Amino acid sequence: MAADTALIVFGATGDLTQRKLYPSLYHLAKRGLLPKSFSLYGVSRKELNDADFRSNIERDIRMFAHGEIDQAAVDMVTSHAHYLSADLNHREGYERLNARLKPSTLRLFYLALPPRLFAPIVENIKTCGLGKALGASKSRVIVEKPFGYDFATAKKLEHIVSSAFDEKQIFRIDHYLGKESVQNLLTFRAKNSVFEDSLNRNAVASIHIDALESVGLEDRGAYYDGAGSIRDMVQNHLLQLVAFLTMDLPAKMTAEAEQSARAKLLATVRPHTSKGAIVLGQYAGYKSEPNVNPKSTTDTYSSLTFTINNPRWRGVPVFIRTGKHLKEKLTNVTVLFKPVRGEAPNRLSFRLDPHPEISLVLNVVQPGFTKKTDPAIMHYSRSTHYTEPPIGDYERLLLAIMDGDHSLFVSAAEVLSSWKAVDPFLKKAKTMKPKVYSKGSLAP
Ligand code: BG6
């Protein structure tokens, strides 16, 4: 990790930075993992001074961090925080920022803004010589989803970002990759030989990815109404889960090899051609949410079927379901194996959230003079093995950015392939009216 690191946040007063970024920096400080010489620069048009910025950060930490507050760790973040009020469209602010940093400082540019605002920022970083010209050891950029609105807009966005930064300087965040339970999908496959030979079309009947949420829009009506569940969850998080489960494991798990294995898999994902391959829903009352069009046909629930068009998985349907305001929060990845001798199918399930678990349903013989079977569940629950809570997703991601480790980030090829996979569904969705479901229900 570089000794001297500056995190420069564009959009320093937004929702994401308040809920995730500042509390995660605090958690890192509490663990003693912030670089020794760390500084935080908030850049925004708003008129604020350093003292205001620091007290806002402290407020966010107190509101969103976990556990008892450690004042020394709070101070470690706030005492290194500075605020620059600047017009992001003008070079002057970037020059002022640069003048405050030592030439040796590693600059991490965090774009916590909607993508339509990226172009002038990236252009100014480039013309001030702070992007490609500095190289990956001095300059990196962090991009948050949404990475575009569809394949075409994602391509344009890629063009903008890559005009100022090389791929090895770009860290595209998909926070699912920072989850221990998601990373464990890969570790589980790589470190347990029993299943790997059965993860293919010969043994597997179907794959099921469920990301059910009990929460609703959480004040994000304006963004969500223009996105919907396919853009918000499927294109990114849930297709990544498909990749984690089904990609060919690289011989060596390096960041580059992992990214390229995921990209290779995602390039083969296509919508299933069956009639029921897309079902959309909208929860009752959605249209009267703040900042939502009263005539909106945006989906808050989608159930989509995909195929993986490669020799390992051809013909195995992948069912993805996600939605808001459902009965409970549950993120699950399940592999249903083909039944043998008329028995119930074996089922391997990974619960990713909440309370990570792994379970395997087997057929076991009933007692007595019989060969009849009953299903039995073998079960691992993280919380009964370990009391230590998982490291937060953003903590893990921030550390990886500082370390220059790309394995937890999404490459341009992955982004573009997953848009290609969902684009036909997005086109079809435009012609559909989602079914209304009641809040707190199971799913349409
Ligand atoms: C975000 C989506 O990317 O992921 C939200 O924009 C969604 O709408 C969230 O609620 C779900 O994340 P998690 O970690 O709670 O499953």
Image (tube, rainbow, N blue to C red):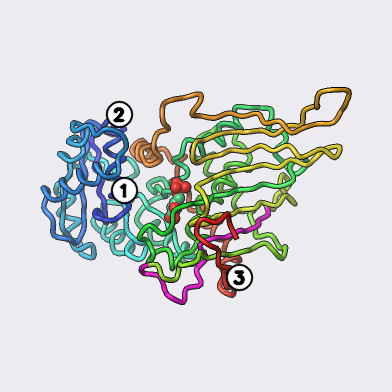
| Residue displayed at 58% across by 70% down | 427
Residue 332 in the image: above or below residue 198? below
Question: How far apart in space, not on screen, are marks 2 and 1 (Cα)?
Answer: 19 Å
Give the quarter of the figure containing the N terminus. Answer: top left
User: For the residue labelled by badge 1, is the local secondary structure a helix, a strand or a loop?
Assistant: helix
- Look at the numbered disc 1 and say if its residue's Cβ is closer than 8 Å to ligand 1: no
Residue ID for mark 2: 31
Foreground mark, 2 or 1, reads 1
Farthest residue, direction front = 368
- Residue drawn at 54 percent across, 60 percent down: 301
Mark 3, residues whose alpha carbon is within 10 Å: few (<14), some, or many (≥20)? few
At which x and y percent is residue 49? 11, 52
Disc number lying in front (3 or 1): 1
Q: Quadrant of residue 7?
A: top left
Where does label 1 land, which residue? Answer: 19
Secondary structure at badge 2 equals loop
**Residue 388 lies in magenta, yes or no?**
no
Identity of the amino acid at label 2?
A: Arg
Q: Secondary structure at mark 3?
A: helix
Foreground pick, 211 / 99:
211
Give the residue at mark 3. 428
Q: Which residues are magenta?
A: 290-307
N-terminal of the pair, mark 3 or mark 1, is 1
Q: Residue 34 at what x, y percent from top left?
A: 27, 33
What amino acid is found at the position of numbered circle 1 in the picture? Answer: Arg
Nearer the N terminus, badge 3 or badge 2? 2
What residue lies at 22% left-to-right and 39% top-to-bottom? Answer: 104
C-alpha gap between disc 3 and disc 1:
34 Å
Q: Main secondary structure of the magenta part?
A: loop
In the rendered view, tell whether residue 284 sits above or below residue 104.
below
Residue nearest the observer in this picture, 15 or 212: 212
